[in-house]
Image: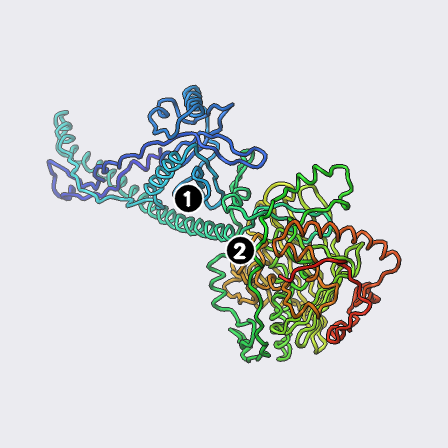
Amino acid sequence: MNPLCCIAPVSVDYAADHHHQPRSVAAATLSATPEAAPPQPTPPVVSGVLHKWVNYGKGWRSRWFVLEDGVLSYYKLRDGGGESGESSASTAAARVIGEGDALRRAREDAAAAGKQWKPFGDIHLKVSSIRASRSDDKRLYIFSGTKTLHLRCETEEDRNAWLEALLVAKDRFPRSLMTNDFAPVADIMLSTEKLRMCLLHEGLNETVVNECESIMMTELLELHSQIKSQQQQHSVLVDRLRQLETEKVELERTVVHETKEREAHGYVNGRYSDFYSVLSGGSASESDPDTASQVADAESDEDEVTYFDTRDFLSVESLRSASRRRELVTNGCNALESIGDSRSYTAKFTKYPIVERRDKLPEPKEKEKPIGLWSIIKENIGKDLSGVCLPVYFNEPLSSLQKCFEDLEYSYLVDNALQWGKQGDSLMRTLLVAAFAVSSYASTEGRQCKPFNPLLGETYEADYPDKGLRFFSEKVSHHPVVVACHCDGRGWKFWGDSNLRGKFWGRSIQLDPIGVLTLQFDDGEKFQWSKVTTSIYNIIIGKIYCDHYGTMHIKGSSRYSCKLKFKELSIIDRNAHQVQGFVQDNRTGEKVAMLIGKWDEAMYYVLGDPSAKPKWYDPMSEAVLLWERDKSLNQTRYNLSPFAISLNELPLHMLTMLPPTDSRLRPDQRHLENGEYEKANLEKLRLEQLQRQARRLQEKGWQPRWFRKDEDDSYCYLGGYWEAREKGNWDGIPHIFGQSSASTG
């Protein structure tokens, strides 16, 4: 103990001036703290055996839990027995929840172990939230902001008892560093009468006695001065501790809030499927959110590490502040207004017609039968996986051709970029093109089913007058799989081809895109870029999730170019999906703007060179919103956005207009959308048998109908599709799907 802590604040006051008048009694007035108030009764210690989720390898494991002084500690159990950090006396005195052999063995081991066992983990309830499972009346969850404990009791009564004890303990220990540090002081008198009498009794004269009193008072004044200094230092320390406590509480609230937001928009547990031509993860039936979060947040007893977010420019408060300063770079006929700098003009947009489209998928006609990927792999060990037909359970009712068009969901950004360029602002045009390039990844969040691999020669058209778009795509090669697309906007064109080079790493698949995307405006300015690497994790076991990482170079043909860094997710920095970059002047090499955001949420920009800012500079204090994701999802296991739901819609009047190669006429995909799973599986098997002939066709010189390779080895649109569609002339177009009656959904 610090001895300074035992010294009470002291003040000294002379009753008389001892240099002028001797006195028989010298008295000093001291300030002392009164006796402390009696402490509140300590809540009882609560203990018992709970089952804790560890990981998929170990599952549920029994642990001895002890709740004391607002801290929940847990200890490992040996061979069904227990290891408690409590002595036998304290364990016996505790309130024990539960009964049975596990509890009996745990208490026996606790008595034998004494105090030698240390807790394996601690949870401070004052910074945690507690909730009961909605799907299991024996489970509860404790969320600390950095990890979640998934616990299961033997009975519902035990769970209710634990919940009551945890909530009572949490209420008894609110978030506060300390209460009143100094109680009201009381004055006491320090008398020298006994000292005087003792000295006189020893035969000392009055002069010597007065001199002794003077020495004592001088020493007392010196002591008072030292105590006063210590008191001031203590006050400064307490003020600093209070400041740190406030910052700590705010940090914990931010972590809890952001983590809950990530859980609210989290993934649905599932399994990945095909190891070939993969664009996004596997699938699962609709799962309980408790089960889904169980995989993500459960910590392993092998290595229980506490994770904290690194310094985050994208905190909730910063994003709200930036949103309030955002430019109205929005869809439709809204005005484009500038905030802050010299951009004070307004650009008007063309009004697009309103087109009614469906907002949900058809109701399934059959009950889905989930199938595990692992069971399929086990049944086909030693076989050629290319000859294995995976069930449609692992697919979503879209093809890769349609997924290409989904990248243009936020095409209004390109429309706005066109208008800014017409006003002579090439910088804003470049910023919006960069936001458009990032926005193409937003649709991958939470999508765990793979799209259908198109047949050779399969096509897809999208005529969206409500967006001012006419899009067309075709599968132009089967080995390797290459999809080419072309889109006409109002005042701009977009084209490219996509080929994925996949690498299987056991627990994950890495997809490296090959190909260049081009965006060209009617005034001649062109931007080109390639996509970044995509990896899908936990494809065999665990919670599937995808991540995009790497560097994207957006090369502009005019004044500006852009470089974006997609940050790879790591176990140290859990602030996922970050994108940062800058816009650079092609002539001077100067950085003129900074881009910050997340590919699944929003993108912001800040004007100026970020490297010229001081270290303490927070870019979000001046950030302006460029793009924000539409977070409305259809609540199905496919997690499709309203835009994605419209892609496979097939109105009756279009049946006679589409070529026989259009993805919407593909029977297995149509049956899957209608929830006819048996028919979908049969059709998928039939089409895959036909598709095996595609390689032979390609080797014999087959050529795509609507695209040709140019001198740069890229596929370019030949033209003529929309003219043939208008005439209904599909002569020479093969019926690649064969004989099948596809419902129109």
Q: Secondary structure at mark 2?
A: loop
Residue 557 location in percent, x, y? 72, 71
View extreme (top): residue: 112
Q: Measured from the top left, where is residue 231 in percent x and y?
A: 31, 44
Neighbours of disc 2 within 10 Å: few (<14), some (14-19), many (20+)? few
Q: In the picture shown, does residue 618 fall above or below 268? A: below
Q: Identity of the amino acid at label 1?
A: Arg
Any mark on residue 131, and which? 1
Query: Does residue 342 show up?
Result: no
Q: Earlier in the sequence, mark 2 or mark 1?
A: 1
Residue 318's place in the image compared with 151, above or below, is below
| Residue at the (13%, 43%) spot, across then down | 16
Q: Is residue 514 left or right of residue 639?
A: right
Question: CA–CA distance between discs 2 and 1?
Answer: 24 Å
The N terminus sits in image quarter? top left
The residue tagged 2 is 635
Q: Is residue 10 above or below residue 679?
A: above
